[in-house]
């Protein structure tokens, strides 16, 4: 819950003047730090939830910043958020670890 609250704070409307690289970098740092701390045990469900929340918040932030109607999944698809903007995929971090699957 705290990581979702933190990502919500980083993507609030008052931060739309920031560059998207700054916001994505901050989100990636928070998510990677959280994932490094909570990497023990079965984490796949938690990683999916955090990824989903971060994508939704970043997409909403981009819609506000660029004045695009929500949800704008065509302009800001999941692939573009990860591949073009560089948002981290937590689920890819532990794909090779057998203990990370649930």
Image (spheres, rainbow, N blue to C red):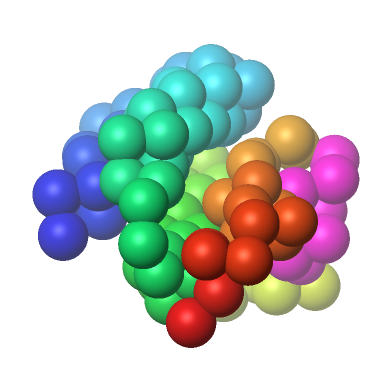
> How far across and how far down the image is residue 72, in percent?
66, 71
> How far across and how far down the image is residue 47, in percent?
46, 62
> How far across and how far down the image is residue 24, in percent?
56, 31
Task: Give above or below for 55 relative to 81.
Answer: below
Please state, as top left, top right, bottom left or bottom right, where the N terminus lies in the image: bottom left
Q: Quadrant of residue 73?
A: bottom right
Q: Quadrant of residue 79?
A: bottom right
| Residue, far front | 98
Q: Decide if residue 54 is on the left or right side of residue 55.
A: left
Q: Decide if residue 76 is on the left or right side of residue 101.
A: right
At horizontal 14% and vertical 49% (from top left) the residue drawn is: 2
Q: Nearer the viewer, residue 10 or 32?
A: 32
Q: Is residue 43 magenta?
A: no
Magenta residue span: 75-84
- Say whether residue 89 is visible: no
What secondary structure prevails in the magenta region?
A: helix
Q: Nearer the viewer, residue 38 or 67?
A: 38
At horizontal 45% and vertical 55% (from top left) the residue drawn is: 54
- Say whether residue 73 is visible: yes
At horizontal 76% and vertical 66% (from top left) the residue drawn is: 77
Q: Nearer the viewer, residue 53 or 100?
A: 100
Number of callouts in the render? 0
Q: Decide if residue 77 is on the left or right side of residue 98.
A: right
Task: Give above or below for 25 relative to 32.
Answer: above
At horizontal 52% and vertical 41% (from top left) the residue drawn is: 65
> How far across and how far down the image is residue 37, in percent?
31, 35
């Amino acid at each position: 819950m705290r990581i979702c609250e933190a990502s919500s704070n980083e993507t609030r409307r008052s931060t739309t003047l920031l560059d998207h690289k700054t916001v994505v970098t901050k989100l990636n740092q928070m998510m990677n730090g959280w994932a490094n701390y909570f990497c023990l045990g079965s984490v796949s469900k938690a990683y999916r939830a955090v990824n989903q929340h971060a994508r939704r918040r970043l997409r909403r932030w981009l819609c506000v910043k660029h004045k695009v109607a929500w949800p704008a999944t065509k302009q800001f698809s999941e692939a573009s958020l990860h591949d073009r903007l560089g948002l981290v995929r937590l689920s890819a971090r532990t794909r090779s670890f057998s203990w990370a699957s649930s």
